[in-house]
Each structure stands twice: as structure tokens, then as C-alpha cells.
Image (cartoon, helix red, strand yellow):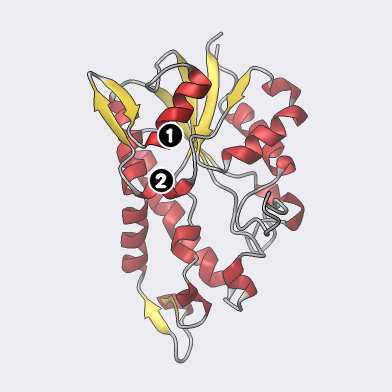
Amino acid sequence: MSQLTITGNSHTIALNQGLGQVPEAAGVTVFGLGAGVYETEAFSATEAGRVVLTQPVYAENLVRFTGQDHIAPDRLWGICMGTHNPRLYGDRIWTGAAAPSALAGDGQRPVSSGLIDRMADEDQRHIRAFLTRLKDAGIRFFVISAPPVRADHQNIVRGADPEVLLEIDRRSRARFRGFLDGLGVDFVDFPPETADAQGLLRPEYAAGLLKNGKRDPHHGNAEYGALMLRRILAEVGQPA
């Protein structure tokens, strides 16, 4: 049986925490490459037909957890990248000064759907390059969603209309899904039961405090991770 290995940004933490709650995932390996902030810079390359990671933290963790310096073709990979959208909706401008055109009220600067799409494309640029390299190299992989927008996101706490953040998130996700469809890559979305009627992450699935005592800004917890793992296994399965 070949191995299922899940990696990516910090949203892998919840998946790792949830492993103990999912006995059927006993053969799955989960590890993080590093923080999502590194996704905004070039972090991969193709060398002699092999996909390598050029970002030092990512490269170090790949070797640490797999013993290999490249994305090896000997397993099925789950890549948790591409739908971490707080980089787009986390700016204070969305707390009242601006809103997507369809939601803009009096005194707010309307931001067109086209501009939001271009912002999403730019944010995803290096992730798309990495995934394209994997596809070109014949690596077997699928992509894993980040959690929904948190109801306690700092901009909502500051007074932003949750629909503003949700609209930005929806458009960004749609752009990424379109890219994956064109690439012929499967996508495992977040479990629908983890979102409320509005589309926000339910509080019972939100991570608590960070190690430094501050409130976690956007991650899911172990319960979320367990549900996500079960969804992954249901849709992708443990490869034979």
C-alpha cells in the first residue's frame, strides 16, 4: 500500500491534531511545511525533473519529515494550500472604508469583482506555480481546503460586515477552484457541517489560544481536523 502524505501550510496543524480521533487514518502522515506567509513568494522549482522546495523552512521540513529533498512520486500527496484567504480579507479597509461592489453602502468605496479576482490570482500565483510543477512532474496529489472564515475574525470584531469577508473568500475560492479544474486536480472542500447558515466557521470548530496566549486568528481545532480527515478519506481514500 502506497502512503498518503498530507502537507502544506499551518492549517495542517488541525489535521495533525485530529489524527488521534480517526482510527482509519492510522496510516496517514501529516506534517506542515511552514507558515502560509511563505506562499506569497516563490518557494518551488523543478530541477532535473524533480520538484524541490526553495524556501529554506519548507525545504528543511520536507527533509525532516520525509527524508527526501524533493516531492517524491512514491506516494499520494494531499496539499493544504490555496484557500487561505485572510491575506485578502484581513486588511482594515474592509471594516468600513470599502466593500465588494455588490455590498458597498453609502460612503464606502466599491471594489469590483474583477479587482478582487486579480488580487486572488496574485495571492495564489506561487501556489499555482508549485501545483503546476507537481502536475508536470507526474506527482499524484489533490488539494485540501482551509477552514471557512471565522466568526471571530479580527475584522468582524472591528465591525466589518461578515458578508464582505465571505464574498471575498468566495470569489478567491472560485478562482482557485477554476485553476484546479483546468489543471485536472481534485479538491477536498471543508466539511459543510463545520460552517453555520451564513457560511462562517462554527465556534465549536475554531482553534483557541496560541502558545503565546493570544487568540488564534483563523485556524480550526482538533475536532475540525478530525472531520476534515474523515472527509478526505471518504473522497480520496487510503491509496492502494
Mark 1 or mark 2, which is nearer the start of the sequence? 2
Disc assigned to residue 32: none
Residue 157 lies, in percent from the top left, at 64, 73
Q: Are circles 2 and 1 on residues that touch, CB within 8 Å?
A: yes
Q: Is disc 1 surrounded by few (<14), some (14 to 19) or many (20+) residues within 10 Å?
A: many
Badge 1 marks a residue whose secondary structure is helix
Residue 84 lies, in percent from the top left, at 49, 51
Residue 117 lies, in percent from the top left, at 35, 61
Which residue position is annotated with label 1?
58
Nearest the eye: 193 or 151:
151
Quadrant containing the N terminus in the rendered view = top right
Q: Identify which residue is drawn at 53% across, 34% down.
A: 32
Left or right, 188 with respect to 54, comes to right
Badge 2 marks a residue whose secondary structure is helix
Q: Identify which residue is drawn at 39% across, 80% down.
A: 110
Res 234 quadrant in image: top right
Disc assigned to residue 38: 2
Residue farthest toward the top in the current orientation of the protein: 1
Q: Amino acid at mark 1?
A: Tyr
Quadrant containing the C terminus in the rendered view = top right
